[in-house]
Amino acid sequence: MDGIIVINKPQGCTSHDIVYKVKKIFNQKVGHTGTLDPNATGVLPLLIGKGTQLSKYLINHDKIYEVVLQLGVKTDTADSEGNVIQKKEVDKTVLNNQYIVNVFNTFIGKQEQIPPMYSAIKVQGKKLYEYAREGKTVDVKPRTIEIYKIELLNIDNNNCKISFKVHCSKGTYIRSLCEDIAKRLNTVGYMESLNRVQVGCFNIKDAISIDFLKENYENTEFIKKHFITIEDFFNKSSSIVLDSRKLQLFLNGVKLTYVLPDGLYKIYDNANTFIGIGVIENKLLKRDIII
């Protein structure tokens, strides 16, 4: 099996845990295109078999999250897993729809964001969370990210919590965003919960649980419904049919002349069997993914 399966990651396990379980189910190479924190839930696309070659087409996808921000409390990890390091009163007068929407709007667009210390970013070959666990601080350079939209979902006045949905670019740290929003509300805060509802074209409504996969992976109809083949993934790409001579050259890595627009193309043989993906650049077709 070569392609993509979209898992709805539960809380309390790592993305690596899910990859390991799916490897055992299919007995094939499995990869992912971006981790979710252990306490986060939601969409986790997994690449299976030769589907791992699709990773270069998935790493820059935008993401949509549903978030709960707890105000008045700051933790050392910027989420609910950390130790409380500060408490600050919340001015209840700012907990109204219009005020919060106005604050959200100040975050729309490109901006520089400083990643949290508890992250996997490497500085001098060492992950930031390793420095943090040792009680060390390092200079973390800001990264350019973009917030496309923030939608207010709910305000819990009694518990000083704000629920919102955010559509953002790759590389955005929601924990840092939560702390920055809290700061503009003149208090502190941390990310209480995080649910990733979309990664690129992969939506939570199409995701399945790891247990559901275990129970049904041998069911042909189940796989047909939930498994995204490499051919399916490129369903919007045009097709090229190669005769046996050109196909052999193509498979051997020879570039073929084709007067077609630059881009990705699905490649088929004379029997209409899907062979893989080719790329045309400057009127030359070269192989990219071969199944």
Image (cartoon, rainbow, N blue to C red):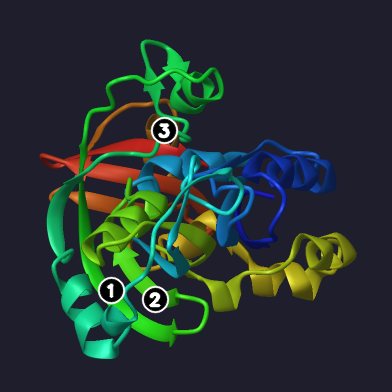
In this view, 38 is above or below 207: above
The residue located at (57%, 79%) in the rendering is: 205
Q: Categorize mark 2 by other alpha carbons within 10 Å: few (<14), some (14-19), many (20+).
A: some
Do the residues bearing badges 1 and 3 touch, measured as CB atoms within 8 Å?
Answer: no
User: Marks 1 and 3, how far apart in space?
Assistant: 24 Å
Q: Are marks 2 and 1 in contact (CB under 8 Å)?
A: yes
Q: Position of residue 284 (x, y in %)?
A: 19, 38
Q: Amino acid at mark 1?
A: Ile
Q: Earlier in the sequence, mark 2 or mark 3?
A: 3
The three-letter code of the residue at mark 3 reads Met
- Give residue 164's mark: 2
User: Please, what is the three-letter code of the amino acid marked with disc 2?
Assistant: Phe
Which residue is disc 1 drawn over? 150
Along the line of sight, the residue nearer the viewer: 63 or 125: 125
| Horizontal side, residue 64 vs residue 142: left or right | right
Can you say whether 19 is above or below 109 in the image? above
Crowd class of label 1 (few under 14; some 14 to 19; many from 20; radius 10 Å): many
Residue occupied by mark 3: 117
Q: Is residue 287 left or right of residue 195?
A: left
Residue depicted at x 26% and y 67%: 185
Q: Is residue 110 left or right of residue 62?
A: left
Whether residue 237 is visible to the viewer of this picture, yes or no, is: yes
Frontmost residue, 271 versus 106: 106
Q: Is residue 217 left or right of residue 99?
A: right
Please identify the quadrant where the C terminus is shown: top right
CA gap, disc 2 and disc 3: 23 Å
Picture quadrant where residue 208 is located: bottom right
Element type where label 1 sits in the image: strand
Give the mark, 1 or 3, whose residue is nearer the N terminus: 3
Residue 163, percent across and down?
Answer: 44, 77
Cα distance between the residues tagged 2 and 1: 7 Å
The picture places residue 126, in percent across and down from the top left corner, at: 46, 15
